[in-house]
Image (cartoon, rainbow, N blue to C red):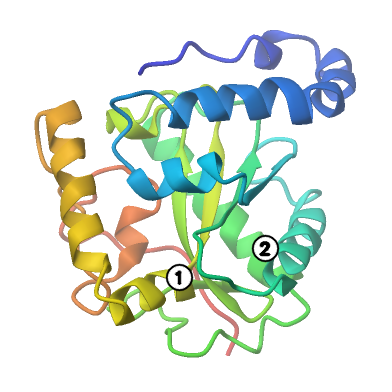
């Protein structure tokens, strides 16, 4: 499952800029499909999303880039405006430029990107219903455009094998779909199957795992095992 570092990221900046738009919907998308469709990839939900083509994928610059924040906010607003149906969906943001060289650096950039998105969000004062804006709260979930998302960070150097995608990426999973699965009685079975597959792949359980309402999901976003005294750097607007 391990992917080599991006060839694109090693090219001169001007060449990278020209090539990013050219490969957005071919190389990035085909590689992400290949990544998710590997037989041992543990997330069955993600497999379903890509099997049904129920996703949006876009490429930006470097993770933590202020310039792209407004563009990504607008893209997420369009994605979030789509009616929620009975199938799972996801928004995938790929950041091919200047990939972080350490897992802790990826974590810092992930939270910087989410902070920039929050500050660029014209609806940032309207936090999504049913979730908290306090990352220390067990009911925290990231919100943009008034819609809550569980964010999954991917990058080549992740300590979790299932998160080692060729380029840094953030996957925004609408929170209401997990609520719907719970209401339908399907969530626990799907969660147990995914966790068992992840243990089979990794050899160990993800130490950050917790259910919504037990412990803040902020610890799970980057994929890095967080320390007991870890504090999320994100701050929501009053």
Between residue 228 and residue 130, name the one nearer to us: 130
Percent of width and height locating residue 107: 43, 45
Q: Which residue appears at 71% of the width and 70% of the height? A: 82
Give coordinates of residue 77: x percent, y percent.
75, 68
Q: Quadrant of the N terminus?
A: top left
Q: Viewed as shown, does residue 221 lie left or right of 216?
A: right
Tell me where residue 65 sits by quadrant: top right
Q: Nearer the viewer, residue 205 or 99?
A: 205
Q: Is residue 82 above or below residue 131?
A: above
| Residue 139 image offset from top left, x and y in percent | 33, 81
Estimate the spatial distance between the alpha carbons at disc 2 and disc 1, rounded to whole Å: 22 Å
Q: Residue lying at the far left in this picture: please name it.
A: 204
Q: Residue 174: image x %, image y %? A: 52, 67
Q: Would residue 183 be found to the left or right of residue 234 on screen?
A: left
Position of 57 relative to 74 (above/below): above
Q: Is residue 164 above or below residue 53?
A: above
Mark 2 surroundings: few (<14), some (14-19) or many (≥20) residues within 10 A: many
Q: Secondary structure at mark 1?
A: helix
Q: What residue is drawn where x is 37% and y is 16%?
A: 2
Disc 2, SS: helix
Q: Is residue 137 visible?
A: no
Q: Which residue is mark 2?
A: 117
The residue depicted at 52 percent of the width and 14 percent of the height is 5
Residue located 58% across and 22% down the image: 31
Q: Is residue 124 above or below residue 206?
A: below
Question: Of residues 20 and 97, which is closer to you in this image?
Answer: 20
Residue 177: numbered disc: 1
First along the sequence among labels 2 and 1: 2
Of labels 2 and 1, the one closer to you: 1
Quadrant placement of the C terminus: bottom right
Mark 1, other Cα within 10 Å: few <14 / some 14–19 / many ≥20: some
């Amino acid at each position: 499952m391990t992917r080599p570092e991006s060839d694109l990221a090693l090219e001169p900046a001007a060449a990278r800029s020209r090539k990013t738009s050219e490969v957005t919907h071919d190389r990035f998308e085909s590689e992400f499909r290949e990544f998710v469709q590997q037989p041992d990839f543990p997330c069955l939900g993600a497999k379903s999303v890509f099997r049904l083509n129920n996703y949006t994928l876009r490429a930006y610059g470097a993770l933590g880039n202020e310039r792209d924040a407004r563009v990504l906010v607008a893209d997420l607003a369009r994605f979030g405006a789509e009616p929620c149906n009975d199938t799972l969906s996801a928004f995938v943001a790929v950041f091919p430029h200047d990939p972080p060289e350490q897992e802790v650096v990826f974590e810092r950039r992930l939270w910087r990107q989410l902070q920039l998105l929050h500050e660029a969000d014209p609806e940032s004062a309207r936090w999504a219903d049913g979730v908290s804006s306090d990352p220390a709260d067990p009911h925290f979930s990231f919100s943009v455009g008034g819609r809550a998302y569980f964010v999954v960070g991917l990058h080549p150097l992740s300590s979790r094998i299932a998160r080692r995608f060729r380029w840094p990426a953030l996957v925004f999973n609408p929170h209401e779909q997990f609520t719907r699965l719970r209401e339908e009685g399907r969530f626990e079975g799907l969660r147990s199957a995914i966790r068992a597959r992840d243990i089979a792949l990794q050899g160990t359980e993800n130490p950050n795992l917790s259910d919504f309402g037990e412990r803040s999901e902020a610890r799970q976003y980057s994929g890095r095992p967080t320390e007991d005294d870890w504090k999320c750097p994100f701050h929501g607007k009053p």
